[in-house]
Structures are given as structure tokens and as C-alpha cells.
Image (cartoon, helix red, strand yellow):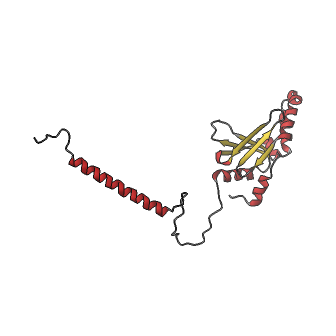
Amino acid sequence: MKASPIQEAAIFAIERPHPNLFIYYVLALLLIPPLLPVLILPAWFRYHTMRYRFTAEGISMSWGILFRREIIVNYARIQDIHLRSNVVERWLGLAKILVQTASGSAGAELTLEGLREFAAIRDFLYERMRGVKEPARVADARPQTAMPPLTGGGSVAELATVLQEVVGELRALRHTLEQRRSETPAPDAPRDA
């Protein structure tokens, strides 16, 4: 399903995760209460520094203060896309989008988290990954007679003519070689004295 221009504009406008992502981080840290004071600060920095950028070429995700990380994935490199969400994420209306590439690693190259528009983003990424274009408009039902131009400036018809000439020359060469072989006596044949 092709995304409308309004949906594409909304996806290109996404830059930050939804605020429910920080709530999810806090709830996950509450599972191990003794580590909450230690791990709450890295979770807070991760949430507040996380940025997404959707461009015409690909997706980028960055986060971190001391150790800044940035992952950029071109749409052409995307092999597969998965949605994953646990019970808490579903309750908060969030899901993770796992983007896999042909990088050789078993895991996802990029994990987009904290997004509420996950289904629309997944569909958008599938479109870009597969190179979906606008359907071609049929102006006339008659077949085209003009051949499309080649990169060198010639047309397909000219190329076909040149290739036919090359085939003709190769046949003539083969015929000439076969004649010479039949005229030349074999080295084992007895010679007349």
C-alpha cells in the first residue's frame, strides 16, 4: 500500500521518540530496584539524546553524550523489517522496528524504538526498500515504434543493426577458417612425391 504524501511528510518529520519511551525505560528498571539509581541516568540520557532522521536516501539514528553513536542505513541495503513489542510496550502504544541489512550480523542493524506510528513507518520502509514507484500512466494503448535511446546516444535499433553486422562478419570468418582447414592436408596424411 503506497503511503500518501501526507503520511510521508509525517514520517519525514519524526525526529524524536515518543515520551512514553522514557516511561518504558523506568518501568523496565523497576524490575531490578537496586540498579534503578545507577541505570536511570544512562536511560535518561539515551532517551533525551535519541534522534531519528528519515531522508530520501535512508534512515539515521543517533544517541549518546560521551560516546555518541550514529547508525545510517540506506533503503537499498534493507533486507527485512520486523515489529516487536512486549506487553508493556503495547500498553504504552509503542513498538520496536528492527531493520535488518545484508551486513552479516544475526541481529538487526538498526532498532527504531519509542515510535507510536510503527505500522505506518514499517509500510513506508517496505515501500522504500522495494523501490515502489508511482504507477505508470497509460496515455495511449498503441505500441510505441520509437526505440529508447542508449546511454551512448544511439538507439536500440542501431545497436541491433550493428550486432547483426558483427554476427555476419563472424559467420564469414568461420566459413573462411573452415575452408582453409579443408584445403590444408592433415599432418598425418601421406604426401605425393
* Total tally of numbered discs in the picture: 0
Visible residue check, residue 79: no
Residue 50: which quarter of the image?
top right
Q: Locate residue 8, reporting x and y percent.
A: 75, 56
Residue at image position (69%, 39%) is: 109
Task: Work out which quarter of the rendered image holds the C terminus and state it.
Answer: top left
Q: Locate residue 45, reporting x and y percent.
A: 86, 36
Residue at image position (81%, 44%) is: 51
Residue 63: which quarter of the image?
top right
Name the residue furthest right: 37
Residue at image position (67%, 52%) is: 128
Horizontal arrangement in the rendering, residue 57 relative to residue 62 (left or right): left
Front residue of this view, candidates 48 and 174:
174
Visible residue check, residue 183: yes
Name the residue furthest front: 193
Front residue of this view, candidates 99 and 181:
181
Residue at image position (60%, 71%) is: 139
Determine whether 83 is above or below 148 in the image: above
Q: Locate residue 35, reporting x and y percent.
A: 86, 28
Determine whether 131 is above or below 186 in the image: below
Horizontal arrangement in the rendering, residue 36 relative to residue 106 (left or right): right
Horizontal arrangement in the rendering, residue 152 relative to residue 170 (left or right): right
Q: Locate residue 153, reporting x and y percent.
A: 54, 60
